[in-house]
């Protein structure tokens, strides 16, 4: 193993961890925000709209630098009884490490984009199917779980896969906050060895390999959820609903 292999592999591991955690936060937030956007409550809709507008309307680089420098605005956070002794004193500078700042910046930004992906997937299912499900006696939760989500996933999964691949490559931007991910590790080496081009080629190869693996995994999941799509397109939706709901109705009878 060459002397540069260790730092490069460590940077690759940090990149993978950062991608996974950021997408986990993004997907979780995206589902929550999508539900809020489609809620009948005007306050929930307004809060979700404001969040999505702010995080989609500002550069992710600015958001990363903001979280990294949050301790300059709030050096400490004190928890306790009002006008009483503090019970807990949190040092924000120690809490918001470069890794935490990167996860917050990328994850919270991704949540705004995932919200629109999830919402568009749910809206792709026609209202007629929801009305038919209600007429057949299904609750809103049963309709969402058995009718809407299986069809919405066919729209959500490809776009989520694309977002994951994009997130993997976007992690390279966190090098500006001195996080030792893949690109920053290579930069730290070539500033000493001056082998800039060879190391950038190595980094590009690793990005390409991981992207290829993610793309293959995405295609496998897409094939699973697209099973029966051709038949669904040519089957009347009311007949499709009855076919899907007959087992549930028998179980409840």
Image: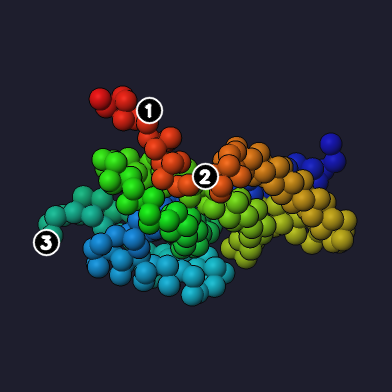
Query: Could you tell which of marks 2 and 1 lies nearer the N-terminus?
Result: 2
Query: Could you tell which of marks 2 and 3 lies nearer the N-terminus?
Result: 3
Which residue is labeled 3 in the image?
Answer: 83
What residue is at 34 percent from the left and 48 percent from the top?
132
User: Seen from this angle, which residue lies furthest left?
Assistant: 83
Q: Is residue 167 above or below residue 133?
A: below
Q: Secondary structure at mark 1?
A: helix
Q: Secondary structure at mark 3?
A: loop
Q: Secondary structure at mark 2?
A: loop
Instruction: State left or right for residue 252 relative to residue 104.
Output: left
What residue is at 28 percent from the left and 46 percent from the top?
134
Q: Residue 225: horizontal and vertical position, in percent?
A: 57, 41
What residue is at 25 percent from the left and 25 percent from the top?
253
Q: Residue 133: horizontal and vertical position, in percent?
A: 33, 45
> Can residue 253 be seen at all in this image of the molecule?
yes
Which residue is labeled 1 in the image?
Answer: 247
Of 89 and 253, the residue lying toward us: 253
Quarter holding residue 248: top left
Query: Could you tell which of marks 3 and 1 lies nearer the N-terminus?
Result: 3
Q: In the image, which is nearer the foreground, mark 3 or mark 1?
A: 1
Q: Are marks 2 and 1 in contact (CB under 8 Å)?
A: no
Are there few (<14), some (14-19), or many (20+) residues within 10 Å of tag 1? few
Which residue is labeled 2 in the image?
Answer: 235
Q: Is residue 59 above or below residue 138?
A: below
């Amino acid at each position: 193993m060459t002397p540069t292999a260790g730092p490069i592999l460590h940077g690759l591991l940090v990149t993978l961890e950062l991608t996974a955690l950021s997408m986990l936060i993004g997907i979780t937030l995206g589902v929550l925000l999508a539900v809020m956007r489609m809620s009948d409550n005007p306050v929930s809709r307004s809060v979700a709209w404001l969040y999505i507008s702010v995080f989609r309307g500002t550069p992710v680089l600015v958001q990363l630098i903001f979280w990294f420098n949050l301790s300059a605005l709030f050096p400490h956070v004190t928890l306790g009884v009002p006008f009483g002794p503090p019970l807990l004193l949190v040092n924000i500078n120690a809490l918001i490490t470069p890794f935490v700042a990167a996860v917050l910046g990328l994850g919270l930004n991704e949540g705004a984009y995932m919200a629109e992906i999830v919402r568009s997937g749910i809206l792709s299912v026609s209202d007629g199917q929801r009305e038919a499900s209600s007429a057949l006696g299904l609750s809103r939760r049963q309709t969402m779980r058995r009718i809407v989500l299986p069809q919405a996933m066919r729209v959500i999964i490809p776009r989520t896969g694309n977002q994951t691949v994009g997130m993997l490559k976007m992690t390279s931007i966190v090098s500006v906050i001195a996080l030792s991910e893949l690109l920053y590790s290579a930069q730290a080496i070539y500033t000493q060895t001056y082998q800039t081009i060879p190391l950038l080629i190595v980094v590009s190869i690793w990005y390409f390999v991981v992207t290829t693996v993610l793309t293959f995994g995405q295609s496998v999941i897409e094939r699973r959820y697209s099973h029966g799509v051709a038949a669904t397109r040519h089957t009347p939706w009311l007949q499709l609903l009855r076919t899907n709901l007959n087992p549930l109705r028998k179980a409840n009878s």
